[in-house]
Amino acid sequence: MNDSAAATKQMKSLALKSGATVVGVADAAAFDAHAPAKHRPADLLPGARTVVVVGGAQPRAGDWVATSPWVLSTMGTTERIQGVGRRLAQAIESELGHYALFVPPGTASGDTPFLSLMLAAELAGLGSRSLAGPVLNRDHGFMYWSAVITTAPLDVDPPDAAPACPAAPCREMWEREGTTPCLRVCPIDAGGCLGGRLEDQRPVRTAYDAGRCQTRVHTHWVGGFQKLLEETLNEPDRERRKMLVYGDFMTRTLWAITYSSTNIAQCFECMRVCPAAHGLREMR
Amino acid sequence: MSVTEAVKAVGLRAGARVVGVASVEAFRAGVPEGYRPEDILPGARSVVVAGGDGPTAGAWRCPDHRVMEITGYDLRENVAIHAMCDHIERDLGHYAVQAPSLPVHGHEPPMSMMHAAELAGLGSRSFAAHIILNPEYGLLYYAALITTLPLEPSPPLTEPACPHPGCVAMYKRIGTTPCLRVCPACLSGTVRDARIETSTYDREKCHSRAQTYGIGSFQKALLTLVEEADAARRHDMIYSAFFTRSIESLGFFRDSIAQCFECMRVCPVGRKHRKLK
């Protein structure tokens, strides 16, 4: 085994032991064709060669089948997978002696991430974009991602050859009804967020209302707090102001901000109905 | 392996970069009554301190300053402290608590982690905002536990980490050091006989620069918002990048502790660990 193969094996093993469900490596240069300038690995870490991507911390099978929508809407978090990313960055530096930059999970400005974690997951061969939007892993479905940019010359993984989306039941549904579970649950022409079709058994996305999706996915969080704060300050009636401040919406919003760490979502409907999103393993 | 070594090994395995031990008696000279370890845990005998890594060397090299502003922390020292507490209570049968380190009045914590790290032989105060520098790794973040378990105290540092020999040479040549030169607004000091002779820093000025986003910026923005009579201006302020980031920093505590690192960026202590391939 050569040096890069051994180093790759060592880091992948650490990632899995630290809690990642999947781990892959992308070539830093591969981002150039897809990511805008200033959002490529070498823009963040001069001399970047590879990007290590870890996936995991996804909702469990039990979360998906829970009858209370509050399970997913209050418990989903990217926190656990980011811990793996941070640990990996430290290990690359202390054990391999190469620079490593944990990609911040927040945004550089507005809604723009420092580096697209979805693109990183695709380029690391860990999954492919679904008609609904999220990158789905073939074996485990929907998951959260974290990435580390490094100058270490690790062995790069090939792209995912067999996309998880569309799943066989979705292809059958398309033939039968001209729609898929995700398109039906959130149709853009009926107040939803998604538009698309299957073409040669491949997903082709034709529309996505990101603004609408965001207001549904993050009903409680930073945006929810800002909205309610404005409403409270605009409210002239003292008693109504008190109701707004102590209301469930404000309370849940504050919980979401302080306990969610870096991400929490309140709408999972396109993923809830997706046959590819919950992994291949059948639960009893 | 001695009990002390075993406890340290648990901390290192859990992610601490360094672990040291101080006896509770060592705190009496410099800590007022009411703030000593035994005032927090009755019958306390030892304080175990864990130092965790700060930003990675890669983060220090990032040309986008926003990366360091919102990320770079692992805070594994807290995990290491909890792992050692569990080991002490479950396996050794002694009380152990994480030492309280968040401020309860102004900037004052119930127990100083900086002082605990010094007494545990892990580092010494520097010119740079009096940050404790570990002689090997430089900037580390510290957490501590207090226990009734008697442990072998770590020896004190034989040489302070600051000033670094390179800084002493610079001071001889031009009368300043890298940190004093990069931030004359917050820092000042003198070197004599290769030791810190005097050192002062403007904590309030430093605080307002180091934490431009955080609880303080949220409070500041909130007061401005409440006092703003014009609804359209309030709307703009609420949805501004500054206020949004301030709210995010409340939630992303570990991702947004400080936004200014300049005195540490130029510090040579521990630099060998920041020069990689």
Image: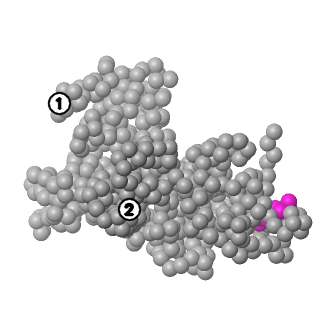
User: Where B245 falls versus B133 (above or below)?
Assistant: below
Residue kind at label 1, given as amino acid type: Pro
Upstream in sequence: badge 2 or badge 1 = 1
Give residue A196's quadrant in the image: bottom right
Q: Using residue A177 as the reference point, say whether residue A188 is left or right of it.
A: left
Residue kind at label 2, given as amino acid type: Ile
Label 2 marks which chain's residue? B
Picture coordinates of residue A213 (x, y %)? 61, 63
- The disc placed on residue B32 is 1
Circle 2 — which element? helix
Q: Which residue is drawn at the image coordinates 17% and 30% (left, top)?
A: B32
Please identify the residue farthest to the front as the structure is shown. A237
User: Where B234 falls versus B249 (above or below)?
Assistant: below
Q: Is residue A169 magenta?
A: yes
Q: Is residue A78 visible?
A: no
Circle 1 — which element? loop
Classify mark 1: residues with Cα within 10 Å, few (<14), some (14-19) or many (20+): few
- Looking at the picture, the colour scheme in use is one colour
Picture coordinates of residue B81 (x, y %)? 42, 36
Nearer-the-camera pick, A19 or A14: A19
Q: Which residue is mark 2?
A: B238
Task: Tell me, yes or no, whether dots 2 and 1 are on the same chain.
Answer: yes
Q: Are marks 2 and 1 in contact (CB under 8 Å)?
A: no
Nearer-the-camera pick, B258 or B124: B258
Give residue A75's quadrant in the image: top right
Question: What's drawn in magenta, residue-wise?
Answer: A163-171
Picture coordinates of residue B25 (x, y %)? 23, 26
Q: Is residue B192 visible?
A: yes
